[in-house]
Image: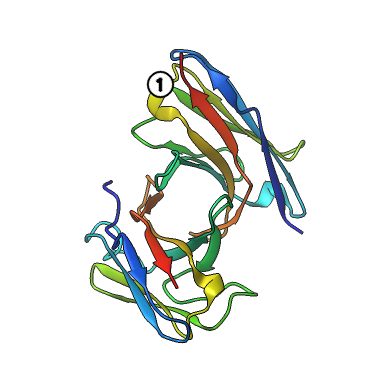
Amino acid sequence: QSALTQPASVSGSPGQSITISCTGNSSNVGRYNLISWYQQHPGNAPKLMLYEVSKRPSGVSNRFSGSKSGNTASLTITGLQAEDEAGYYCSSYAGSSPYVFGTGTKVTV
Amino acid sequence: EVQLVESGGGLVQPGGSLRLSCAASGFTFSSYSMNWVRQAPGKGLEWVSYISSSSSSMYYSDSVKGRFTISRDNAKNSLNLQMNSLRDEDTAVYYCVREGYRELDYWGQGTLVTVSS
């Protein structure tokens, strides 16, 4: 499975909203509502931010939201804060090769 | 508190072998599928291998199939990755990751594997 396509970088000012896209195909993103998003600060392990397209784990801010349309999923961060500056990766369940990740997006605040 | 602690990383020559381990605590290990995910220096995440809770199913990425073997010991709450015939491109931080339903909900801090002569 080829990696899902994400923009290399997205930037925004504090308080603004940004959206990161994640494009796959009909075998992964388009087929399953099993999209997850991970945040990774430099030197740290990734952290689950959203799962099943738009569900938030306990403790994740409601400033993070997700959606999907066709073969493209999106992560939106509203009320951008300095602590949101990090790398973000999408992932889709993909059957017997269970996970395919996105190429990653660096968010700059 | 869920904890996943990897060990076993280090420097190895091309063609060599290494065995990674992951000690799990804070949850019922035998009830969860587990994965290994790696990240080459400055690069993105790459899924490597999956094992079901009872070890009945195991999957590998094409890049490691035939060279890596995943296993687990539910009695010892441990996950392993035996890596043989290592290549330069296997150099990465390797993360031990718990699977929720179809998402990777808890990650260890990772262990660095460097393949170099």
Count residues near mark 1 (Cα–Cα under 10 Å), then give few for <14, some for 14-19, many for 20+.
Answer: some
Q: Position of residue A96 (x, y in %)?
A: 38, 46
Observer-nearest of A27 and A5: A5
Q: Can I make out residue B65 in this image?
A: no
Q: Position of residue B31 (x, y in %)?
A: 66, 52
- Could you tell me the amino acid type at mark 1? Arg
B7 lies left or right of B104: right
Q: Is residue A58 above or below residue B15?
A: below
Quadrant holding the C terminus of chain A: bottom left
Observer-nearest of A56 and B8: B8
Q: Is residue A59 above or below residue A63?
A: above
Q: Position of residue B74 (x, y in %)?
A: 71, 39
**What residue is pinned by disc 1?**
B87
* Residue B67, quarter of the rendered image: top left
Q: Position of residue A56 (x, y in %)?
A: 54, 75
Which residue shows up at 65% across the image and 75% down it?
A59
| Number of marks in picture | 1
